[in-house]
Image (cartoon, helix red, strand yellow):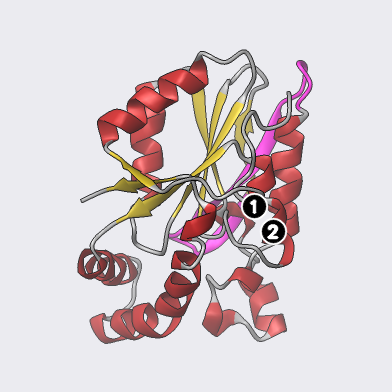
Amino acid sequence: MSSPASSSPASSTPPMNTLTLAEAAERLATFLARDTRTLLGIVGPPGAGKSTLAEQLQALHPERSQIVPMDGFHLANVELARLGRAGRKGAPDTFDSHGYVALLRRLRQQAEDEIVYAPTFRREIEEPIAGAIPIHPGVPLLIAEGNYLALDQGGWRHVAGLLDEIWFVDVDPALRMERLVARHMRFGRSQADAIAWAQGTDEPNARLIEATLPRTHFKVRVT
């Protein structure tokens, strides 16, 4: 597989335009018309709807696209406890960023007879699961999805250069917070604990992610 077809966000600052879902679908079609694999990044703060958008895009071309989530590179809970970071789970240093970069590099160089296995994250147990997503070499569109794809620090600084484009998911802040609290409650937190985690842990990460907007190519407005 070849290198990114476009210049990376780290080396250029393209005009920021907002894509409608219809325009996003049209852009996917242009990616699939290429003779090389395209890696598209979907980034946004917690609760923005990244996974939902990635699933909607993938469903447009289910036989020719696949999602490559960042969340599978969460550090295990036991390691977060050892490092004293369990109360900050979701922050940039609670992931194996270099591991994610290594995966993207493998996907750029994937041999025709190679299946690359990516990890996933299971919210019901709050743990990553290795080797859960088989990625076949003939898939021309990979949709990388996660919080820190445009972050210019630590291992994350290498991600943007491995992606052809990065799209930022734009959503009403109040709706995003409502979704976050509901998600935390769905997976076992009380309402008070869910609100406290969303405001105390998720929001500092959200501000960091929002600051990466200039390093992305387009915004996609979701509701």
Q: Position of residue 167 (x, y in %)?
A: 45, 45
Tell me if mark 2 has few (under 14), some (14-19) or many (20+) residues whose alpha carbon lies within 10 angstroms of its own: some
**Is residue 193 or residue 62 the one in the foreground?**
62
Viewed as shown, does residue 46 lie left or right of 120? left
Residue 133 placement: quadrant: top right
Q: Amino acid at mark 2?
A: Arg
Q: Position of residue 202 (x, y in %)?
A: 42, 75
Q: Position of residue 68 (x, y in %)?
A: 56, 40
Against 202, residue 212 (above or below) is above
Please tell me which residue is depicted at 76% across the width and 46% down the height of the picture: 102
* Residue 64 visible here: no
Question: Dot 1: what SS?
Answer: loop
Q: Is residue 119 magenta?
A: yes
Frontmost of labels 2 and 1 is: 1
Residue topped by disc 2:
157
Q: Position of residue 92 (x, y in %)?
A: 60, 69
Against 91, residue 3 (above or below) is above
* Residue 162 visible here: yes
Q: Is residue 91 magenta?
A: no
Q: CA distance from mark 2 to mark 1?
A: 8 Å
Residue topped by disc 1:
10
Q: Are marks 2 and 1 in contact (CB under 8 Å)?
A: yes
Q: Which residues are magenta?
A: 110-129
Tell me if mark 1 has few (under 14), some (14-19) or many (20+) residues whose alpha carbon lies within 10 angstroms of its own: some
Please tell me which residue is depicted at 65% across the width and 66% down the height of the picture: 75
Against 114, residue 174 (above or below) is below
Please tell me which residue is depicted at 26% across the width and 48% down the height of the picture: 222
Q: Amino acid at mark 1?
A: Ala
Which of marks 1 and 2 precedes in the sequence? 1
